[in-house]
Image (cartoon, rainbow, N blue to C red):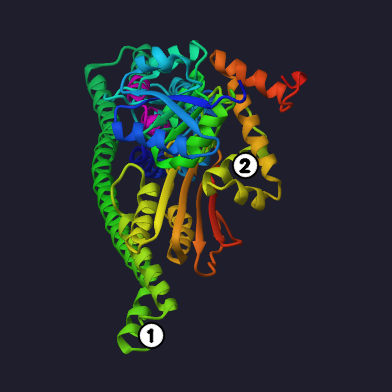
Amino acid sequence: MGEHATVHATMRIALLGVAAGVQFGLSLRQLAGHEYRPTWVAVAAFATLALVTATAAVWVVRGKPLPRTVVALGTVVSLTAASAATAVVPEGGHFGAPDWAVGLVGWHLVLLLLDRVPVLLAALGTHLVVSAGQFALAGAPGRAEVGAAGIVALGTVSMQLAVVVITRMLVRRTGQAMAVAAERDRLTTRVLYAEQWEREQRTVFAGQLGATLPLLADLADGVLDPRDAGTRRRCALAATQLRRLFAENDEVPDPLVHEVTACVDVAERRGVEVSLAVSGAAVAVPAEIRRDLTGPVVAALSAARVRAKVSVLRTDEDVRVAVVADAGAEVVAASTARVEVECGTYGDYLRTEARWRRNS
Amino acid sequence: MAQEQLTAVVIDDHPAVRDGVAQWLAAGTPAIRVVAAGDDVRVAWLGDGAAADVVILDLHLGGPAPATADLRRLVQAGRRVVVYSMRADDAIALRCLESGALSYLTKAEGAEHLRQATIAAAAGRAYTPPALAGALAGDRSERRPALSARETEVLVEWFQSESKEFVAQRLGISLSTVNTHLEHIRIKYAMSGREAPTKAALVARAIQDGLVRLDDL
């Protein structure tokens, strides 16, 4: 569709030039140089054909396809004008120099009907039959005159048909070229996408490793004391973050619960007694939302001392991931753009809840 | 009648579970006596088991298919059933409530919840342990009853914390209000779906207790 439109639009601009050029460059001279009776019919026919070209130009110069009504009207008007002009040709002038309309109107028809080939062929055929009829009615032509007329008719029509054939070939070639270009574009996009994905993965990993690397450096340099409770808590946090990060790219049916389980796993290895409860049927949660939902779990579990309860609840409206634990330390977790986080201490207990409203 | 000791029958395919449950129930206050136990539902229909106040039923007796037909028959006979299951499966828990079980506990939930559930069941009352609260809160079925925002919050908080004191503190309400909300929710569930004698009794009991008024229904 696209390539058709482009080729047709370009060809029409050329045809517009041809129609105007033939009419004003060749036909005008004939109109002025011969005597037509009545003269006004020939002049009116000439003006009408010029008007058809001008009307078509309104769409053609903007590269727009011609509306159906313009095409239908233009075809009928052109054919009528041409036969009117032929009707007033002086005797013996049929298919000759005075009969300027016989060759000219073919260009108008090609201009109007370039993308409607069957209709174009029918219109050109009608034109030839009518012209031949007028030629025959104008007085019994001799064999030589018929032959000359045939050569003129064949010459003009074959040039016009050649334009149609060239257009069709161009359409096909352009189609192939555009398909190749589109495939190349798709490949380029895919390569760019893959590169960007890899870059993002690196940044995400680097971003989430951020807490781990300085911690390891400080431990190695002896800046931090591994026996210190604060250091141990930072290690627990880093370990949970890493474990959750590794779980993030696993192919599992319920990634959220998988990531929460990974956090629970690390806490249990640390000796915390954790119970995990999951309720409500699984729903799809985008990766970045999962990161926001499990962030507070990581923080709360690494602060838990002896016991913790982790729960995942999925309802019609929201997904809520909560931790209630006997806290050994304050936990700070902030809300993100799409996940509300609530954090609080109640007596000896710490509670965090991350809540994603699915429809917001 | 009120002075008599509460009795229960335990149906479970593991002897250790049967003995453990009997031990747990006997050790609490008030003590509950397990009068019969076995790995077949028949113990609840014959002998001492037929007269026990509460039936504690393991839903997965030896096979993968849950014993829902057995549950339904017991409930139809007016027996007060506490389902005690290995699996924390929301859909099965909701189906048991629909059939008329007074409580659904997972074996991970421990002695205290089982005792509470048994005492409540003996009086024809429902008990909602945290896992069941989660199942109710996550219920997305068409015919689920409409809960108020407060009721939903209580369910969710109870599921999350497993501590009613914690829920009361968090929401700034009294412990008894927490319980009232939970009972209200269960009555709403008892009034939805299939009819069962125990569900009707639960609603009647709630009216008697002044938990709901007739014009609320």
Residue depicted at 71% across the width and 28% down the height = B211
Image spot of residue B175 (x, y percent):
67, 44
* Residue that numbered label 2 is attached to: B154
Q: Is A20 in front, or is B100? A: B100
* Residue that numbered label 1 is attached to: A224
Taking the image as shown, residue B205 lies to the left or right of residue B135, namely right
The chain to which mark 1 is attached is A
Image spot of residue A7 (x, y percent):
34, 42
Tags 2 and 1 in contact by the CB under 8 Å rule? no
Q: Quadrant of the N terminus of chain A?
A: top left
Q: Is A323 in front, or is A141? A: A323
Tell me the quarter of the picture where residue A103 sits.
Answer: top left
- What stretch of residues is rendered in magenta? A102-123
Q: Is A329 in front, or is B141? A: A329
Image spot of residue A156 (x, y percent):
30, 32
Q: Secondary structure at mark 1?
A: loop
A47 relative to A267, above or below: above
Number of numbered discs present?
2
